[in-house]
Amino acid sequence: MDEFRIQGGTRLAGRIRIDGSKNASLPLTAAALLAGEPVTLRNVPDLSDISNLAHLMGELGCRVDRGEGTMTIEEVDPSCTHARYEIVSTMRASICVLGPLLAKRKQARVAMPGGCAFGARPVDLHLRGLRALGAQIELSGGDIIAKADRLKGATIFLGGPFGSTVLGTANVMSAATLAEGRTIIESAACEPEIADVARLLNAMGAKISGAGSPRITIDGVEELGGADHIVIPDRIVAATYAVAAAITNGDVTLEYFPHDCLLAPIDLLQNVGVNVNRLDMSEEPTRCTVQVTSERRLKPGVISTQPYPGFPTDLQAQMMALLCLADGNSIITEKIFPERFMHVAELTRMGAQLIRQGPTVMVQGVRRLFGAPVMASDLRASACLVLAGMVAEGETIVSRVYHLDRGYARMEEVLNSLGANIQRFNPERKHEPEPPVITTVPAAKAKPSTVATK
Ligand code: EPU
């Protein structure tokens, strides 16, 4: 298993471009199951989660052609409807094939995803929504078995104890596109990834309005066709690199930065003393160029994670790394996944002063962190440890970086291109580490567009 060896104390400077969004690409790929024609996605990030889903799409009877940043999906054998546990257990987001399979192929057998490093991850809201559309659903041998002749539109409340559900909304919205009549989803997830899925579905011929708000209306159609779609930039990756600039007192320019999808994290960064400046006000605010700089010790902050447009749970760990070095006490409360604190013990090994009580952590700012061997436990916790390692004194070894590869394409190359000193190393290969790879990430722009190919 690969690990990162990070020499701390470098200051990041330079320019990078943000990749397409993982959490949009996953339900977008699954939505292609609804089409009778090829669907092409562009700006798809090169991540292991995407490869895993592409593999699953192959098992579900689709031909998947991947080029640099593109993926074309075409149905060739609609008789395959089984998403096996072996794949679903590697990536719980595989659940997003359930709604599209059921709507288009009238049946689906999808392994029930288990929990994950940060607690139970139920799918009851997904099932409640699909049952409201008329699906018959039972559990057998650890699989969700869903059937429906033709789904029927309904008014569905999708709120749960922790707010709405992102992939649940994607599943129900996607399924409702082929249902008979009108579906209204109340308490829908408002995340930009949901609005992006709706944009693709509408280009395929669906009739969806209100996506991005808590009330989505879908008027069912008989069939959907192909489309060509550019995936939105990854807001979590963008903000992670903004924190990387801040934590190293750096000066980093980020292109294709989804500024207006990150207003809560930007507000927090600015409140603690980080400069986040849009460089060109004429650019589209969800894909613009932003410069992040920081020159001084930061002030403490208060964070409470919330559904969009609140502060994202997917940035809680990275922001904790930053606040470890603030001048005073910060408070972080996790309201989406109350157990998502695997990074706390690892940061403590690096000298952080953290006191956790239930879903809240008090971060007592320290003057410095110290390099240590630490273990990555999930995607965002891993990113937090890399950030901490870049500013810690001495060497930090982050093991199990396969978690990182799920959501950050070649993270060490991107950070090294900005001046970091990170080596990827596989201890099982028992040879000396390669010298750090310095790669320049091309600074190009892509314009948003979604067009039907019918
Ligand atoms: N929930 C339920 N019942 C359900 C579904 C969810 O109670 O049927 C609860 C969850 O336990 C959680 C809350 O609702 O407390 C929100 O979960 P949600 O369903 O929105 O999470 P998700 O759709 O499975 C996506 C992202 C996660 C991100 C969450 C929250 C993808 C592939 N995953 O997961 O991203 O943390 O939304 O914003 O889109 C990541 O990228 O690192 C990641 C974990």
Image (tube, rainbow, N blue to C red):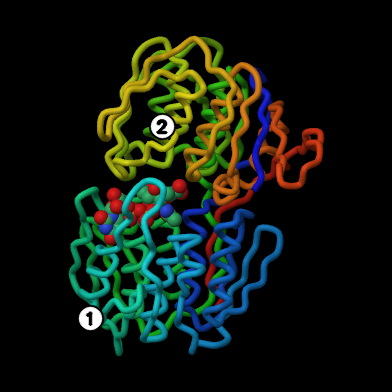
149 is higher (above) or lower (below) than 208:
below
**Does the image show residue 207?**
yes
Residue 389 figure quarter: top right
In this figure, which residue is indicated by the disc labeled 1? Answer: 134
Amino acid carrying label 2: it is Pro
Residue 404 figure quarter: top right
Amino acid carrying label 1: it is Gly
Q: In terms of sequence position, does the residue under pointer 2 or pointer 1 come before the other?
A: 1
| Number of other residues with Cα within 10 Å of mark 1, as a class: few under 14, some 14 to 19, many 20 or more | some
Q: Is mark 1 within 8 Å of ligand 1?
A: no
Front-lying residue, 203 or 123: 123
Q: x, y (%) of residue 277?
A: 52, 25
Front-lying residue, 254 or 401: 401
Secondary structure at badge 2 equals helix
Residue drawn at x 19%, y 67% is 156
- Left or right, 298 with respect to 68, comes to left
Residue drawn at x 44%, y 29% is 319
Q: Is mark 2 within 8 Å of ligand 1?
A: no
Q: x, y (%) of residue 417?
A: 72, 33
**Does the image show residue 165?**
no
268 is higher (above) or lower (below) than 152:
above
Residue contact at pointers 2 and 1, CB within 8 angstroms? no
Tell me the number on the disc at residue 174.
none
Residue drawn at x 42%, y 27% is 320
Tell me the number on the disc at residue 265.
2
